[in-house]
Image (tube, rainbow, N blue to C red):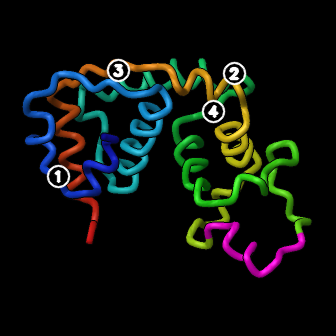
Amino acid sequence: MLLGHATALGIKVEDYYKKKDRLIMTKQDFIDNIAWLFGEATELNIDLSEYPCFGELKTEFYKILDQMYIDGDYTIDEYYDAWKLRGDNPELYRVDGIMNNQIKYRKIDYYAINKYVDEKYRTDKNQRLYYLYHYDSNVRTVGKETYDFKIVFDYIRLVSVIQKGCNFK
């Protein structure tokens, strides 16, 4: 189960991790989870320096990100912002990884763009990341590799704090 989904579903974090000391997931899921965790923490004004796991998670995130996205230098914030574009139809980004604004929309194409995403996230760099997520063979190959994530106490505490700060209905 993805961390974001467990948090969103309202599962008590401590109970979920009670008998687990590690999670096995794909590298893609790991960096998605960590980007979401850091992004939510930032949006909730949570001071990540209060969590010792922060440094290790960030190091692991960048190590995997660099393995997957070898064509550029991306930050965790850019990755999180590009993640927000995942509601868009990826076909719109097929022109050099930048959205093709010249597409003539049919009525059904109205739904090709996630209207809830603020336009400030549609930077060229974020659009390029979104494009690579869908179409780059290295991203897809490395992203499918297994990642063994060791759970530490303050990680559970961080996920719990974020869960309490999110407004799920």
Magenta region: 104-114
Disc 2 marks a residue whose amino acid type is Ile
Disc 1 marks a residue whose amino acid type is Ile
Q: Nearer the viewer, mark 2 or mark 4?
A: 2
* Residue at 67% over, 73% down: 111
Disc 4 marks a residue whose amino acid type is Tyr
Place of residue 52 in the rendered image (x, y in percent of width and height, measured from the top left): 24, 26
Q: Measure how far apart labels 4 and 3 are at the Cα level.
A: 18 Å
Q: Measure how far apart labels 3 and 1 are at the Cα level.
A: 25 Å
Of pointers 4 and 3, the one earlier in the residue sequence: 3
Q: Which residue is mark 4?
A: 74
Disc 3 marks a residue whose amino acid type is Glu
Helix, strand or loop for disc 3: helix
Of pointers 3 and 2, the one earlier in the residue sequence: 3
Of pointers 1 and 2, the one earlier in the residue sequence: 1
Q: Which residue is mark 2?
A: 70
